[in-house]
Image (spheres, rainbow, N blue to C red):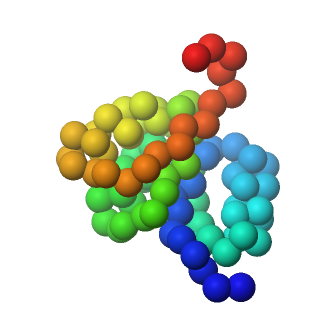
Amino acid sequence: MQTIGRLLLVEDEANIAKALIINLEKSGYHVEWQTRGDTALTALKNSVYDLVILDIMLPGIDGLEVLRSFRTAGGLTPVLMLTAKGDV
């Protein structure tokens, strides 16, 4: 299958990440997986993605701070936030 987009998945729960990766790759996306906020921020500084799927609760730097830093640096890539929290 031809790749239709490059995604950065930032998720520290391996089972969730692996399920997402399998389904996204079956749909033709190339997925890079990071498990920590600080390494995700480095990846965002060094590469271009079509979409970022970002967990809120991460080791290193939480997802909200990753997004804040990314936007402050001028990053415009769409970001989909994931959370296991019960609150909005």
Residue 37: x and y in percent read 45, 43
The furthest residue to the top: 87
Q: Residue at x 75, y 47 (%)?
A: 16
Quadrant hosting residue 24: bottom right
Quadrant hosting residue 32: bottom right
Q: Is residue 40 above or below residue 66?
A: below
Q: Residue at x 43, y 64 (%)?
A: 49
Foreground pick, 64 / 3: 3
The reply to whether residue 17 is in sight is: yes
The furthest residue to the left: 73
Residue 68: x and y in percent read 32, 35
Q: Residue at x 42, y 31 (%)?
A: 64
Residue 19: x and y in percent read 78, 55
Query: How many marks do you count on the picture?
Result: 0
The reply to whether residue 58 is in sight is: no
Quadrant hosting residue 42: bottom left
Q: Quadrant of the N terminus?
A: bottom right
Please give left or right for residue 20 compared with residue 53 in the image. Answer: right
Q: Quadrant of the C terminus?
A: top right
Q: Residue at x 69, y 16 (%)?
A: 86
Residue 25: x and y in percent read 70, 70
Foreground pick, 54 / 43: 54
Q: Is residue 20 above or below residue 81?
A: below
